[in-house]
Image (cartoon, rainbow, N blue to C red):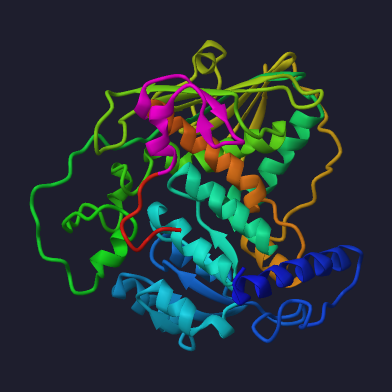
Amino acid sequence: MTSHENRLSRRALLKKSAAGAAMAGLTAVPRSVLGGAGHAPPSDKVNVAGIGVGNRGWQVIQMMEGHNIVALCDVDSNYLAKAASRYEKAKTYRDFRRMLDREDKHIDAVMVATTDHTHIPISVMAMKMGKHSYTEKPLGHSIHEVREATQVARRYGLATQLGTGAHSGSNYRRVVELIRARAIGEVREVNVWCDEAWGNRYRPRETPPVPQHLDWDLWLGPAPYRPYHPCYHPIAWRNWWDFGNGRLGDMGCHLIDLAFWALDLKCPLTVEAKGTPVHPEGTPLWLIARWEFPTRGELPPVRLTWYDGGRRPPKQKEHNLPDWPEGVLFVGSDGMLISHWGKHELHPREKFADFQPPPRTIPESIGHAEEWLSACKTGGPTGCNFDYSGPLTETVLLGTVAYRVGQKMEWDPVNVKAANCPEADRLIRRAHRDGWTL
């Protein structure tokens, strides 16, 4: 180990000790236990750096402004200027690497809300410097990236949170309680859907000049070089494999999260997918992906299916279920439960007309961002830490890999490989541009 890594490993061990003390009921942890002057004790505020502060990042950083916003970073100077006008004391940067280097002693934690393909290079660099990480979904652009982030967070004992805010909402908690209480019996089937999809595009032929407010090379990050075009930034980049993973990569972590949590899912045995003809550059206009999960203790095996681009599970029409634009349908031996972000229903309605929900066993969250900020100070738990959200994201991304190789894959999570499909290796571990290796 380098002296820097040795110091961080010792810090991780001490943080775990601090977390145990906090969980035992202690109300304060000495600053020295949490790693020195750059880390605040529970009585102080967390020093947060926002990386990617436009659009979703702008929303998330405002959830954290009860703490100290000490630095802001964005490749788009327009977004950066807007954020800086609200957080006047924060230092501003275009390049996250320069920010982390110069502000190392002042930053406790980072909020990463950049494009999907830059999540992990940023988060991993920050975590290797001992910074806690709140990273927007999906956790990474490839399965190898996700596994790397999960291992780094665990190695350094950091507080992490995936930006799947519905996990901290009351509705998801009530659904998990119902499924675990066997309100609809034994669940062996789950269907998840999301209406919109996009993609199947070739890159544009026009090569307009890069606007002055955008650092295009930094925006590309680890992706292969291509000329700038306004169709990529700031919105539609998920149309292309180089930057995103289509609708499944966009919304899968949000919706499949509910099934993962309620049914204690981890790694699938197999995955297969179909959609519009595979495009060399663009994501599919519609996709259906299916994962098979093994038994977990006394819980039976589960088949989970994803639909997007207007596709729906047949049972929705067969049983006259609500036609919500997004949904999660649990099919049990004694009934069905359908849910979206803020509402759920038990079906058949007549069977559950007098149903009394089980006692609440999952406490309400203090808020998705605040939960993470509290963990940064105390070492306490978060609902979507990378140990949980890593396998969730890997599962989601496996759906896009199976679609692109056109084959049912047998998943080997230990070796991070499709046991029967070596051609999937190039998608499981995507090549990074020179200078952007993890």
- The image quadrant of residue 46 is bottom right
- The image quadrant of residue 189 is top right
Q: Left or right of 66: which side holds 361?
A: right
Q: Residue furthest front?
A: 1
Q: Left or right of 73: which side holds 47?
A: right
Does the segment drawn in magenta span residue 174? no
Q: Is residue 97 visible?
A: yes
Q: Is residue 138 visible?
A: no
| Quarter that holds the N terminus | bottom right
**Residue 58 in the image, given as x and y percentages of width and height:** 44, 67
The residue positioned 72% from the left and 65% from the top of the image is: 375
Does the segment drawn in magenta span residue 413? yes
The one nearer the camera, 426 or 91, is 426
Q: Which residues are magenta?
A: 404-429
**Residue 26 in the image, given as x and y percentages of width and height:** 90, 72
**Residue 23 in the image, given as x and y percentages of width and height:** 86, 63
The one nearer the camera, 7 or 375, is 7
The residue positioned 47% from the left and 41% from the top of the image is: 251
- The image quadrant of residue 130 is bottom right
The residue positioned 66% from the left and 49% from the top of the image is: 387
The residue positioned 16% from the left and 66% from the top of the image is: 210
